[in-house]
Image (cartoon, coloured by chain):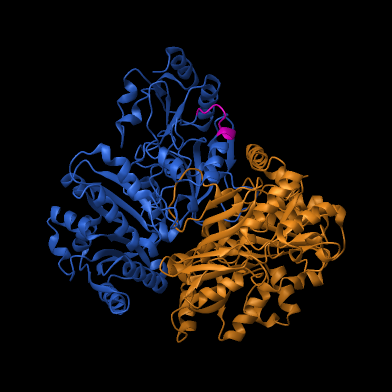
Chain colours: A orange, B blue
Amino acid sequence: MLDQIHIDNLIALIGVSNVMYGGLGKRSDPGMSAQNLGADVVVNPGSQAEIVKLVEYCNLQNISVVPQGGRTGLSGAAESEPGQLIIDMHRMNQIIDVDLVSSVATVEAGVKLEMLQNQLSENGLSVGVDLAARGSATIGGMVSTNAGGTEAFRFGTMRHRVLGLEAVLPNGEVFSDLKQVIKANEGYDIKQLLIGAEGTLGIITKVVLALAPADSNRTTALISCENARSAAMTFQKLRNRIKGDLLCAEIMWPEYAYTTARSLNLGKLLEFSESPADVFVIVDIATNSLDGANSYLEDLLSDLIDDQGIRSAVVAQNGREASDIWKIREESFLCDEKYPNGYWYDMSVPLSHLDQYVEDIHARISAIDKRLKLFLFGHLGDGNLHLTVSSGLSCPELQPQIDAAIYDGLREIGGSFSAEHGIGNQKALSLKKHSDAEKYRLLGLIKRTMDPNGIMNPGKIFLY
Amino acid sequence: MLDQIHIDNLIALIGVSNVMYGGLGKRSDPGMSAQNLGADVVVNPGSQAEIVKLVEYCNLQNISVVPQGGRTGLSGAAESEPGQLIIDMHRMNQIIDVDLVSSVATVEAGVKLEMLQNQLSENGLSVGVDLAARGSATIGGMVSTNAGGTEAFRFGTMRHRVLGLEAVLPNGEVFSDLKQVIKANEGYDIKQLLIGAEGTLGIITKVVLALAPADSNRTTALISCENARSAAMTFQKLRNRIKGDLLCAEIMWPEYAYTTARSLNLGKLLEFSESPADVFVIVDIATNSLDGANSYLEDLLSDLIDDQGIRSAVVAQNGREASDIWKIREESFLCDEKYPNGYWYDMSVPLSHLDQYVEDIHARISAIDKRLKLFLFGHLGDGNLHLTVSSGLSCPELQPQIDAAIYDGLREIGGSFSAEHGIGNQKALSLKKHSDAEKYRLLGLIKRTMDPNGIMNPGKIFLY
């Protein structure tokens, strides 16, 4: 743990009630990893000025800083260890301004996504990025990890929503670029380095977001397709036809879909499918009124049935059916319960390569151990796959081979081994292995240029 | 001009037919500035490998390199001078792949926008960024300047369309990040530094673009509004209501609109407006069929008339009327003809600040010289204003004061003094003046880190 002299100095900087240590630093909810609170020294600054003081002190004293938002990350970017200082942003939770004329929101970094969503929806607006951890995830954390979610094919990831931001850099200086406009070409767009930097280049304190129109009534359909290519073409045809009214497009491969549906006692929902080898697609479509929404969607899909390899489709007849369909997609932990000790992956694959890639990884995983199963689903609209590989048995000795089976060749087809969960400490080795050499060199150059003492979230993105 | 020994060595690298000098280097079309061909030594590489050889040589010999695409830039980013080497990308003009399943195009940097548009439109797809210089502008140039245009409120600027790119860095190494997916978090997004760098960090050779659905039939309306606020609210209401079917929203202030319309003999088109002080808005709306499109748009607008300060509106009854309405917006050079010797500006202003900003600059410009007129129009959807300030008389001594009148205070309201035309050499001084100090420090750090010998397009973005 940090020496008592440092703790005394931190207390002098921001007050005794905002510094937790000596066991108290581990009493909060650690979120997705117990190691998030490993440092056991947590400061809760209430302003950017306090963060400046803290970072200046840490830079001078060579103390490592771990910034934390909602602690919902899945790659260990918020993990900390004794001797480090956690800067917890939860007190900086003000929605500073929602400008309805400009369609722009300005918020402190500690604002939770759901809090902002609630305020916006009253005005018919939306953040444009949504994810399951909305009740905990903060806007600052979402910017730092360039969060994606289910709407990225419509509105992009956080990188595409951020118009401006302020951050405290590792040297304690404030970088301020609070643009409220999308067109601004004033030299290199430095804020893009901070977006997705997972706290390794500074601490984001304030964010300006472009807002999107909120959606009207939504109707859900479940579609079975011959393969991922026909699923992708169905998606493209639907999007070209109804544009912004296509709200979601998710994909599930059969092993995942049947395992989850049976665990939920919802197996009957999949019986409309004529072949057990089909992939399933869930779409949500916006309709102006509820009247006639179902028959509108049925007509829309039946136009595509012969055309694009859709085998069959069902439209949810009410909210309960829609919610049941979505449960199969969302309650992915049920596969983990049935097949524990699995490894999770988060890749992006160009839609035209989906079938070949899925076939290849099945073959490669099977060659490692025939008992390993692949539970595969994801965001069809942007080719973002989530995957659990498990035989139910613990097999840590196989992980390097499984990693290689999943990751090798992704770069060559234009995909990514790290889609929306970030690198953190878990994928730092894979980043080194799968990066373009010149890109990896530039990553290190920029880190050393902006953080010469290496105090900002060390061991994340880069290996220690 | 470059010494003959260098020219001989360049010829040895890429062949005599691809090196032009001794007057021949000035024979091409210089595009938007005669100074673009000032160097008089032009090389036309045909491959990335040749560019690597050229840049390695220049880096070793400390020769300044000026990359050029379509030479359509308006801020002097492609200007060159004796002793420098122009790398002209026009031979690298292959559309490598259009992937309809993934909705992604991969192109060489020298491909012209219009060439790509033509190929895409056959498949119902679009680049998502359009601009008047489409016949000359290259994709590489558009990425290097982060081009915007009329569709940025829908699909973003080039920064938001680029999934991947390849570039030759100042050290002659190739940076390769040819992702075809939108979700990829693999450390800092280095390609964002090259986007909008105006050739100062490397030469973009290949680009992967996300594609957007093409639009169906379009109907045009001309609307008169009490002020810019009601214009902005009309835009927001329309966008929230019809989302992706709102294709364009442009704004013209009265001095600009009446001057241009009269020059075109189209003054009668503006007579529907009840007040000469009104601002005009042009919208294009997509409709599934031509039948009933006009009455659909009339109904849509009449809903807004009482609600949002729309005073009156006319819907173009045919293609000729639509084209006449658009002429008033597009033939902005007519103001320059009538009032020559003007100064051009390209700002972004948050929509909620438009009225106050326009009132302020009128007052400040009038205080400089009462004879100065402001011709103001722009892209309403993203607050991007284009402005000419002119009394018709030459007044170079007033330019610094006029610059200050237009630029001061923009940063504080979240706007930008440089929206879509870039910095080039014309605004390098203004960039220094109007940047956040820490941002400007980082700009210089990154330039020196990536281009220690300062060979890539010197004097652009940064002062010599």
Tell me which corner region of the image, top left, top right, bottom left or bottom right, holds residue B298: bottom left
Q: How many marks overall?
A: 0
Residue closest to the far front:
A12
Magenta stretch, main secondary structure class: loop
Classify the position of the C terminus of chain A by image quarter.
top right
- Residue A126, placed above or below residue B356: below
Residue B124 appears in the rendering: no
- In the rendered structure, which segment of residues is drawn in magenta? B448-455
Judging depth in this view, the residue of B25 and A380 nearest the camera is: B25
The residue under the point 35% across, 37% down is: B71
Q: Quadrant of residue B413?
A: bottom left
Q: Position of residue A393 (x, y in %)?
A: 87, 64
Examine the image and state in which quarter residue B89 appears. top left
A74 sits left or right of B421 in the view: right
Q: Residue at x 32, y 47 (%)?
A: B345
Left/right placement of residue B318 relative to residue A268 reads: left
Of residues A32 and A246, which is closer to you in this image? A32
Residue B352 as seen in the image, left or right of residue B320? right
Residue B127 on image: x %, y %: 42, 53
Residue B277: x and y, percent? 21, 65
Q: Which residue lies most toward the top here?
A: B5
**Is-magenta flag for residue A100?**
no
Residue in the foreground of this view, choosing between A20 and A69: A20
**Is residue B290 visible from the viewing direction of this image?**
yes
Quadrant including the N terminus of chain A: bottom right
B69 shown above or below B345: above
Residue B452 included in the magenta stretch of the image = yes
Left or right placement of residue A385 versus residue B262 in this view? right
B104 relative to B83, above or below: below
Picture coordinates of residue A453 (x, y %)? Answer: 72, 41
